[in-house]
Amino acid sequence: MTRLPSQLQPLWPVAKRAHRFAARTSGSVARRTRSAYGDRALPLQGTRFSAETAALEPETVTLHPGIGVGAEHINRTLPTGLPAEHWVFARRAQYEVPAPYCLEIAGGITTGPDGTNITPGGVLDYGTSEYFGLAGWKEHPVYLQRQLPEIEDFDGTVVSIAARGGGRNFYHFLTDVLPRLGVFEDAMAGMKADAIYAPVHAGWQRTLLEMAGLGELKVLPASGESAVRATRLIAPSLTNTNEVAPSATVAWLRSRLPAKDLNDRPRRIYVTRGTAPRTRRVVEEERLLPMLEQRGFVCIAPEKLSPQEQIDVFAGAEVIVGPHGAALTNLLWIQPGTRVLELFHPGYVNAAFWSITEAIGGIRYEYLIADGAERFGPTSPMNKIQADVDLSAERIIAAVDRLLAD
């Protein structure tokens, strides 16, 4: 949705329905005419669960359950905030996280920017290829093309860690793409990969892969023009499809990408999104900053820092204030005892970062939503994604002072 111009983002529900309808329609045609496209034909069928894929093609597909990590039952207490007990947080307070696994596919294909995994028999494994807001595999965006891209054959083991949104979004790269490596290491202990299939068009993506220990491994770039058929394809399961930050996922990221230098880091930070309109900025930030500075806060713009510097700054902070945005993914590295205040527009409230603080434990997280929350109830699409946060500086400071009081 962030790729739509801000003026068109209110039309997102309509655009999404059109996208899903187009995929269903074009996919139906593609499945009937696939013989014309040879090995570049789109998937003939799909499954909802990877166990079904393995049952359909037992000679080429094997499901490997996780060894050290199992299912997780999430039951979280709602955070403090205004307005109290907001429904978005209530919907994420309880959740059943399935046990992770890897799907091994002999001669499997992985394709596209989000890692769509297809068996030699033409089965789309939706369990390892999930996409945002779909009713099932027939609506998958792989069906929005006439045929697969030109296929590159790779002699060896490829681990596909590309995931929906990870090609361009900092949050999804960290919480969807990288954790698939952890699932691979757990479920396929001792197996060595010859290459990974991952999004690497941005420098920060390559840096994070190197920090995670993949710097020496061959990377096959995931994009809309790429398709790789491997002798052995490994497709790890997705662990964070509903943005609930499972504890095992958060623990793996914290251990794999640790803070390194906490010396001279600011103890109280305000995370800015800049001053450009329609970017989810805080409208009264210019008035707010001097008030925060009086309370010992330092304003930071994480996009100006390297990934390691971002980790270190957040790990060293004791109090963090800022509007909802991808930079707050760095809450992954805060320490128990840290206090967090997240600011929202009423038309776009998201529980992803609260979920991270809950997975760490011992964090005091609070939220503040601008006026008008009553207009965006449980049936709201929450599509005001780039709307600016119109909270008065005085209201934000009152919330900050409450957060600092105890």
Image (cartoon, helix red, strand yellow):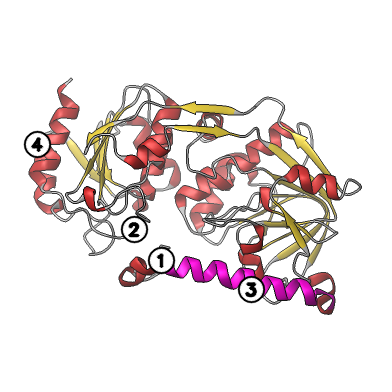
Nearer to us: label 4 or label 2: 2
Q: Earlier in the sequence, mark 1 or mark 2?
A: 1
Residue 99 shown in magenta: no
* Callout 3 crowding tier (Cα within 10 Å): few <14, some 14–19, many ≥20: some
CA gap, disc 1 to disc 3?
Answer: 20 Å
Over which residues does the magenta segment extend?
A: 14-35
What residue sits 67% from the left and 49% below the top?
Answer: 128
Q: Earlier in the sequence, mark 1 or mark 3?
A: 1
Which residue is denoted by mark 1 in the rendering? 12
Which residue is denoted by mark 4 in the rendering? 294
Tell whether label 3 touches label 1 (CB within 8 Å): no
CA gap, disc 1 to disc 2?
Answer: 10 Å
- Residue 164 falls left or right of residue 348: right
Q: Amino acid at mark 3?
A: Thr
With respect to residue 165, does 327 lie above or below?
above
Of residues 8 and 293, the one drawn nearer to the viewer in this rendering: 8
- Residue 27 falls left or right of residue 3: right
* Callout 2 crowding tier (Cα within 10 Å): few <14, some 14–19, many ≥20: many
